[in-house]
């Protein structure tokens, strides 16, 4: 008699948030997170962040000093956008709860 292996994980696999619209119970004030234009904006931010990391070298900053300020401002804006998305998704999934 052959015994099968017990599956340790049951349920649906965890997927990235870049797929089709999810049918979650969302508040009207945070449903912007699942819109197509927001996903495209976040993908663009990821590419800009990648370019910023590539430009972030001491030799590059020696050759083009203002680039240091430009990459810093880009990183600040992108960090703010990713943080806002993270907080909104945590609120949607019930990790963060508001008082009331």
Image: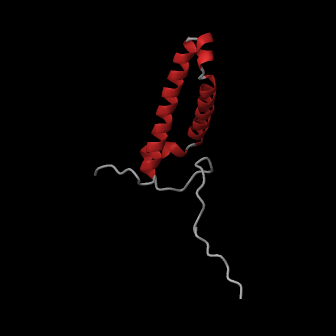
Q: Would you say residue 27 is visible in this rendering? A: no
Above or below: residue 14 compared with residue 61: below
Q: Residue at image x 56%, y 38%?
A: 38
**Coordinates of residue 28 in the picture (x, y in percent):** 44, 47
Above or below: residue 57 compared with residue 62: below
- Say how the picture is coloured: secondary structure
Residue 62 occupies which quadrant of the picture? Answer: top right
**Coordinates of residue 94 in the picture (x, y in percent):** 41, 54
**Coordinates of residue 32 in the picture (x, y in percent):** 50, 42
**Coordinates of residue 75 in the picture (x, y in percent):** 52, 27
Point out the image quarter for the N terminus: bottom right
Q: Residue at image x 59%, y 64%?
A: 12
Q: Residue at image x 56%, y 43%?
A: 35
Q: Outermost residue, left direction?
A: 100
Task: Please give the count of numbered marks on the rendered protein.
Answer: 0
Residue 93 occupies which quadrant of the picture? Answer: bottom left
Residue 41 occupies which quadrant of the picture? Answer: top right
Q: Would you say residue 68 is visible in this rendering? A: yes
Q: Outermost residue, right direction?
A: 1
**Quick check: 42 left or right of 94?**
right
Above or below: residue 26 compared with residue 50: below
């Amino acid at each position: 008699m052959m015994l099968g292996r017990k599956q340790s994980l049951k349920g649906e696999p965890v997927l990235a948030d870049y797929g089709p619209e999810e049918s979650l119970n969302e508040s009207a004030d945070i449903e912007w997170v699942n819109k197509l234009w927001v996903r495209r904006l976040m993908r663009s931010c990821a590419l800009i962040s990648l370019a910023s990391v590539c430009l972030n070298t001491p030799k590059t900053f020696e050759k083009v000093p203002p680039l240091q300020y430009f990459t810093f401002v880009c990183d600040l804006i992108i960090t703010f956008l990713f943080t806002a998305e993270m907080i909104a998704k945590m609120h949607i999934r019930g990790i963060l709860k508001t008082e009331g």
